[in-house]
Amino acid sequence: MTTVESASESSQAGGFDLGALLAERGAERYELHTRYLNHQLPRMLHTIGFDKVYERAEGAYFYDADGNDYLDMLAGFGVMGLGRHHPVVRKALHDVLDAQLADLTRFDCQPLPGLLAEKLLAHSPHLDRVFFGNSGTEAVEGALKFARFVTGRPRILYCAHAFHGLTTGALSVNGESGFRDGFAPLLPDTAVPLGDLDALEREVRKGDVAALIVEPIQGKGVLEAPPGYLRAAQELLHRHKALLIADEVQTGLGRTGDFYGYQHEDGVEPDLVCVAKALSGGYVPVGATLGKDWIFKKVYSSMDRVLVHSASFGSNAQAMAAGLAVLSVMENEQIVAGVRATGEQLRSRLAALTDKYEMLADVRGRGLMIGIEFGRPKSLKLRSRWAVLQAARKGLFAQMVVVPLLQKHRILTQVSGDHMEVIKLIPPLIIGEREVDRFVDAFTAVMDDAHDGGLVWDFGKTLVKQAVANR
């Protein structure tokens, strides 16, 4: 009997059977969340009709118990870059578990972290070293710590409407007050408008700025840094001995049609780069802070400081295997080139609808990170309905579009941020023409209904009542 077989039989003898547990109690999912977890989540899902029961998932689709497919245009907030259960990533995880490696001994150097760092840095030619943590917010925390330490300065600049995470340091550079309210005091950080170089210069001249952290395309609202901004900001920061941190947690690993979002602009070489989400393959949480050699050598300046920044589960074998498999798939299946082509097809077809629908104000983004923004209509009948929604709560019209996309067309999307009339599309990077056709056809049908005063507006009344009740 092999060791693996012995462990398997021992587990069964211990009485734990995951399949049996799910079969017995899986139907309690919403009740369990209400009782033991965030009780507002099931309440919200019931209210907007998102309380579906998905039985399995594959690629860009979910499936319910009746076999109906649901197109995923959300990708777990970007985590499922390769879709769900990619066979290469699954095999890598089976292999690493079967290998029974001596993982996380804390006092050795396993090969997988070094191999993943090497492969990741091959896509980041101006960067030299990597710290592996467990999430995007942890990658941001590491970058903030490193920047403050190596510059000897306390203040980090961030952009209005930014989202960099929800732990205390990352929350300090979060541009949405709704996330920050009630959690003060935070770090001494300052917001500047995205794209405003004058505002940036006013702050860095004060001499206490360690870095600017910026998303090449903001997740909240899908707002892109203006052309030339990142390079000009980098030059300005370096002139004042401050650093540029690129938060690529959502935009990185091919999402925008280049490996990193900042690579759309020539000459941009951030001092620190944060990645996570898609690197996980959708299985094992992983985050990475990439940086220049001099930064790491200053932080880890002696053997006494060898553990000055560390993570208990950082560099674990499962996460490293998943990351290696993800990068291998991206190279072998030419994911970035596919994203560029499919993203342009989707964006251009949606943009062509702006002349047809008066409530469709803008379609923007890069690659497979697309924002669909709605705005005030011109016709009197639609304008009056729009006004009712806006008076109750900004963002309700976008929600009115998201709900029928799921309920009538079985397509999962999201509103891009609180109090925003923007839908964000961040589907798995593997989608193709079939998925583009399905989404555009469904979106057209929903917009036809909205402009004809159809059933979409009946749901709008429900949203208005709920918004008023929550005041």
Image (tube, grey):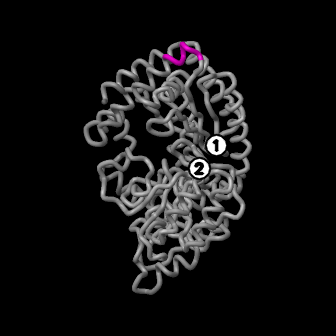
Q: Residue at x 72, y 37 (%)?
A: 345
Closer to the camera in the image, 49 or 244 = 244
x, y percent for residue 7: 39, 60
Q: Residues within 10 Å of mark 2 (few under 14, many from 20)?
A: many
Residue sitting nearer the eye, 334 or 211: 211
- Name the residue type under label 2: Ile
- How many numbered tags mark residues here? 2
Q: Is residue 163 visible?
A: yes
For mark 2, what is the residue? 217
- Dividing the picture into quadrants, the one containing residue 3 is bottom left
Residue 330 at what x, y percent from top left?
A: 66, 54
Which residue occupies the foreground of this view, 94 or 79?
A: 79
How far apart, in angstroms, are the residues tagged by discs 2 and 1?
8 Å
Label at residue 458: none
Q: For the residue marked with disc 1, what is the amino acid?
A: Gly
Residue appearing at x 50%, y 69% in the figure: 131
Q: Position of residue 466 (x, y in %)?
A: 35, 24
Please check the rendered image and state whether residue 269 is part of the magenta-colored stretch, yes or no.
no
Q: Give the side of residue 44 with respect to residue 405, left or right.
A: left
Quadrant location of the C terminus in the rendered image = top left
Q: Is residue 400 left or right of residue 349?
A: left
Task: Tell me which numbered mark, 2 or 1, is placed earlier along the sequence.
Answer: 2
Q: Which residue is mark 1?
A: 365
Q: Is residue 161 placed above or below 124 in the rendered structure?
A: above
Instruction: Name the residue nearer the viewer: 174 or 459.
Output: 174
Span highlighted in magenta in the image: 379-384
Q: Residue at x 59, y 34 (%)?
A: 372
